[in-house]
Image (cartoon, coloured by chain):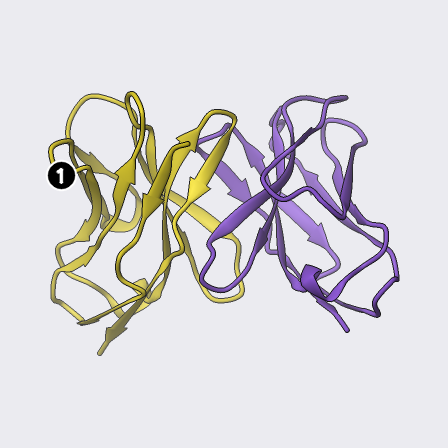
Chain colours: A purple, B yellow
Amino acid sequence: NAGVTQTPKFQVLKTGQSMTLQCAQDMNHNSMYWYRQDPGMGLRLIYYSASEGTTDKGEVPNGYNVSRLNKREFSLRLESAAPSQTSVYFCAGGVVGEQYFGPGTRLTVT
Amino acid sequence: AQSVAQPEDQVNVAEGNPLTVKCTYSVSGNPYLFWYVQYPNRGLQFLLKYITGDNLVKGSYGFEAEFNKSQTSFHLKKPSALVSDSALYFCAVRDDYKLSFGAGTTVTVRA
């Protein structure tokens, strides 16, 4: 029982490159979330998915897209990376208040 | 919008001493409040929650939190801190479909 897994753990991109962050959960949660964490700003919600087949924007969705491939998997895509997207990205599953987080992806955009 | 504030960026305590991490909230209606902890290079872990009922909420790892409606606070406490409690702590409030997190408080417990 791995909980929530994320790949990759680290990534360096050049401005304008694209990439997809992968997230999978084995806890059978309906809801999944993508956050970014920046120093002094806590966590900010990028997108969430309340159930398989649905996705909705969070606080900071610009520059990102998501796909809820099935109940287990929820991916985050950066179509054209920008230095402002340098951050640590966390995926989570669970209900609104009690969420289970993955280990994070540290992304640097140069 | 619902929000929380953590007034201290850092808290330093000696091992064995009481630990308090402060959080104040601003909500319309009844607050749903939460504490999470983040150890270095890890994701956040749920510690405890207040939905309704007793003002003193007990959580994981010996932590508890006190809900105070008159002071709009939800402070996290531990009677006797351990070096292993050194981490980043986040207060959060339910805001419709999402959680709004505070900026976080770094706790350092020295041996």
Q: Position of residue B46 (x, y in %)?
A: 41, 43
Q: Quadrant of residue B29?
A: top left
Q: Nearer the viewer, residue B82 or B36?
A: B36
| Farthest residue, direction right | A17
Q: Nearer the viewer, residue B61 or A82?
A: A82
Task: State which quarter of the image contains the C terminus of chain A.
Answer: bottom right
Q: Which residue is mark 1?
A: B71
How crowded pointer 1 is (Cα within 10 Å; few <14, some 14-19, many 20+) is rated as: few
User: Is residue A2 visible from the viewing direction of this image?
Assistant: no
Q: Quadrant of residue A38?
A: bottom right
Q: Residue drawn at (52%, 59%), measured in percent from left and top?
A: B42
Q: Residue drawn at (50%, 32%), measured in percent from left and top?
A: B98
Image position of B29 with respect to B11: above or below: above
Q: Nearer the viewer, residue B94 or A21?
A: B94
Image position of B41 with respect to A33: above or below: below
Q: Position of residue B88 (x, y in %)?
A: 38, 61
Q: Is residue A41 left or right of residue B37?
A: right
Q: Residue drawn at (71%, 41%), measured in percent from left and top?
A: A24
| Farthest residue, direction bottom | B111
